[in-house]
Amino acid sequence: MKIAVASPPIPKSLKDGLFWLEELASDAASQEAEIICFPESYLPGYPGMPYPKEDREKEPLKEALQQACRIASTQKIAIILPMDWYEDELLLNVAQVISAEGKALGYQTKNQLDPTEDEIWTAGKTRQLFEIKGLKFGITICHEGFRYPESVRWAAQNSAHIVFHPHFSGSDEEGTVLTQFFNPDNPYYEKAMMMRALENTIYFASSNYASKYAESASAVFAPDGKCVVNEAYGRTGVIVADLDLNLATGFLAKRFKNKLYKNL
């Protein structure tokens, strides 16, 4: 099973985001990837990015999802598409899952918000697995995947082969230009990616924007904690990994004794 991870530029608008969604989905499909994952809140963009305010309203987001379904169907590739999304009148941070046939299969909510996000989104309350062509996967979004390993362990205990991790770390405005992946002096994010794979014995695929001052690179880690492939900082593009699903046993996650902590 080949999977792809996208590193798009920070979107200037929904239209711009959809343009890069199609470009990168097409690139991944040409490399025979079955599914591609985009970064956190990709449509219309993470709060503070330069998209127009109206792009964050309910109807434009619904129309954008319809366009994304068309792209998935045209390119014949499944898409994990992080979006702002309204459930009734509540604004959620979600990752939509779209099949290669262009069908929206549902979404995973961000359940553990960063403290700075409490006034932006409403936290979700449920967690679920998805399956596409025999690949069982969970999704954990940014902060919760970096700081709440339980979000990944749950998926691994329930036989996920991989957890996809849309995130955003960095800026186009200011920061440090990183040059070496996994350098000890880099921010801790890439080390956390490694640990989510290693401690659960599954694959972990993390997608970030290709910003000028990225604090982490998009990457895929194997169940033994080794990096399968990583993107160059600031480069717009896709990385593709060929997964051996037999290696994603979830062995260490399934040995965790949940009952010992039932009163916590």
Image (cartoon, grey):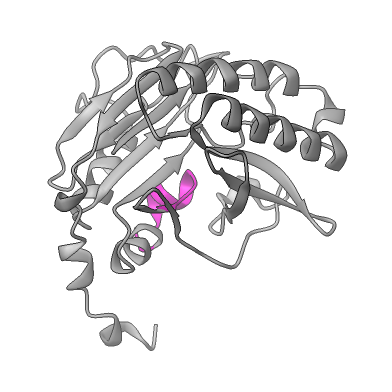
Please tell me whether residue 49 is drawn above or below residue 232 in the rendered image. below
234 within the magenta span: no
Please tell me whether residue 210 is drawn above or below residue 155 in the rendered image. above
Question: Quadrant location of the N terminus?
Answer: top left
Q: Which residues are magenta?
A: 138-150
Query: Which is more toward the observer, 45 or 19?
Result: 19
Image quadrant where residue 260 sits: bottom left
Please tell me whether residue 195 is drawn above or below residue 63 in the rendered image. below
Does the rendering let one see residue 13?
no
Please tell me whether residue 250 is drawn above or below residue 21 in the rendered image. below
Residue at 33%, 58% in the rendered image: 160
Query: Which is more toward the observer, 119 or 223?
Result: 223
Residue at 50%, 18% in the rendered image: 26
Does the rendering let one see residue 182?
yes
Residue at 62%, 61% in the rendered image: 124
139 within the magenta span: yes
Side of 99 where 224 appears, left or right? left
Q: x, y percentage for residue 46?
A: 64, 32
**Mark count:** 0
Residue at 53%, 14% in the rendered image: 174
Q: x, y percentage for residue 226?
A: 14, 37
Q: x, y percentage for residue 68?
A: 66, 32
Side of 122 where 179 appears, left or right? left
Image quadrant where residue 111 sits: bottom right
Image quadrant where residue 201 sits: bottom left
Q: x, y percentage for residue 44?
A: 70, 30
Side of 29 where 90 appears, left or right? right
Question: Quadrant location of the C terminus?
Answer: bottom left
